[in-house]
Image (spheres, rainbow, N blue to C red):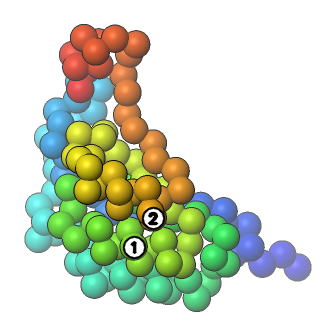
Amino acid sequence: MINLLDTIEICDLGIATRCNFQCKMCRSWQESGCPEQEMSNADWEDVIKQLHQLLPSDRKVIFSGSGEALLREGVEELLCLAASKFKVGLNSNGYLIDEPMARLIARNVEAINISLDGTTPQTHDYIR
């Protein structure tokens, strides 16, 4: 009999409900949540720890959501905790990645997906 937990390769953690952009193809910024409505970082830490009890450490945890994950206060600690237990991915629009954040990402994140729309800066900026 197959263990369903063994079939899980990626776990997507939707930690972001707010966004710093107002993209033309996305309306989540109009419906953005309030920080008070989000799960607390302590709750997310519990989720990561519980996932670690259930899944092997070679699985990937991706930080994403309906908004920008890096807007979340305390995301640095969550990334570090997750990286100590899993492979970590991050979905971002890239706008908040400054030098200190880039160093943190380089130390803790195996793969990052950055949203790029179009082949020219003008197209990208028009959409984003």
At a point 63% along the width and 76% down the height, the residue shown is 57
At a point 22% along the width and 19% down the height, the residue shown is 125
Quadrant of the snapshot with the N terminus: bottom right
For residue 82, which quarter of the picture? Answer: bottom left
Please tell me whether mark 1 sits on a helix, a strand or a loop.
Answer: helix
Density class for disc 2 (Cα within 10 Å; few <14, some 14-19, many ≥20) is: many
| Residue that badge 1 annotates | 80
Mark drawn on residue 3: none
State whether residue 65 appears in this view.
Answer: no
For residue 70, which quarter of the picture? Answer: bottom left
Quadrant of the snapshot with the C terminus: top left
Residue 77 at x, y percent in the picture: 31, 74
Marks 2/1 in contact by CB < 8 Å: the verdict is: yes
Q: Amino acid at mark 1?
A: Cys
| Residue that badge 2 annotates | 108
Query: Alpha-carbon distance for marks 2 and 1?
Result: 6 Å
For residue 105, which quarter of the picture? Answer: bottom left
At a point 40% along the width and 48% down the height, the residue shown is 91
